Amino acid sequence: MQTLYSIESMNNETKPGEPIKILQKNLEHSRQLFTYLVYFITEVARYAELDAAQKAHKHLPTHGDLNINTKISGNELVWNVLADDSFKKAVGEYKIASLIDTELIKRIYQALAESEEYKTYISIQARDKKSEKKMLEFIFSTLMLPNEDFINHIEENFIHWDDDADMMVTLMDNFFQKPSAFNFGEMLTKEKWDFAKDLLNCVLDKKEYCLEIIKPKLKNWDADRIAALDMILMQMGVCELLYFETIPPKVSINEYIDLAKEYSTPQSGHFVNGILDNIHKELISENKIHKKNFRNSTL
């Protein structure tokens, strides 16, 4: 969707192979952002050691200063991530450490140390995977995402944050569930990457045909005044209806309704739903849904 919108903004004037390069670049931006979010969490956890060292070296340290609980800095998930070769490579490749705001790390750690969740966590000496993951999830969902300073920091360093935010939340949730299965070197499996390329190429190749199907359904709507993103989503939806055999039509329609609600105008979800549902019914009545690969289809 982002790639097609970028191409639309370029008046569809792209060189051969350029759309795939744009898609790859967008995915690289997402991979960099995801790596940074994970790295930021590990830095908050590891700050406990720095906090303990600084307080212990005060001129007149108190008993509390000399007994800072640093359990979080030894979080097993944190150290598994830090030891992961694909993570280390991504951190170096994107120069992630240079983007860190140490003062922000400190403030978020202080908020963590004051929270009841953290006090409960450090009160239990034993470690278990569930509590280790839960603590890192708490840092991300409660201390980072709602934090205006953190969001401002992210927006300053990652211009695609607004577009990627929801995807990042999903990726982080998946990561916390199965951290050992995550490869920071590839955001997508080969199967998903092939699907993304095919869908992009399909929409570009079948654009005129898709518009021939869509425009008659717009009735009193002026096609030139409809949100560009809505038109892109409908073209993607029509392509999935016609050419992607592994995706049930209702799944495609629901997916593009959700995307329209999330990324376009307040009315877009209802609008895209009505148009795609109408098109789906017509394609069925005309026996045009054969789900052939767009490269082999006569449509």
Image (cartoon, grey):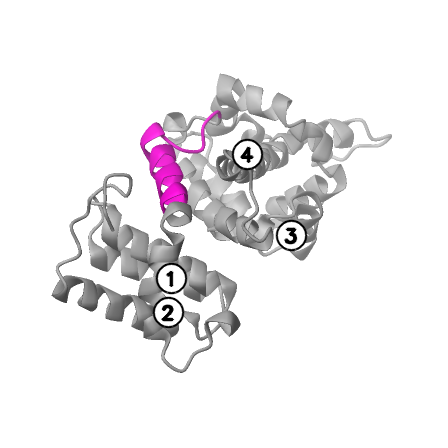
Q: Which residues are magenta?
A: 185-202
Instruction: Give the farthest residue toward the right.
Output: 59
Q: Where does the image place residue 219, in percent across and percent down from the top left?
A: 36, 79
Q: In the shown orientation, is residue 37 left or right of residue 1?
A: right
Sequence-first disc among 4 and 1: 4
Q: Which mark is residue 215?
A: 2
Residue designated by label 3 = 151
| Lower position in the chain sequence, tag 3 or tag 2 | 3
168 up-or-down from 267: above or below = above
In primary-sequence order, the first of circles 1 and 3 is 3
Which residue appears at 66% of the width and 57% of the height?
Answer: 148
Query: Could you tell me which residue is drawn at 51 percent across and 70 percent down?
Result: 224
User: Which residue was labeled with disc 1?
Assistant: 211
What is the secondary structure assignment of the residue under circle 2? Answer: helix
- Real-space Cα distance between discs 4 and 3? 20 Å
Task: Give the mark nearest the N terminus, 4 or 3.
Answer: 4
The residue type indicated by label 2 comes to: Lys
Query: Amino acid type of disc 1?
Result: Leu
x and y, in percent, of residue 295 in the image: 28, 39
Left or right position of 290 against 147: left
Give the Cα distance between marks 4 and 1.
30 Å
Front position in the image: 49 or 202: 202
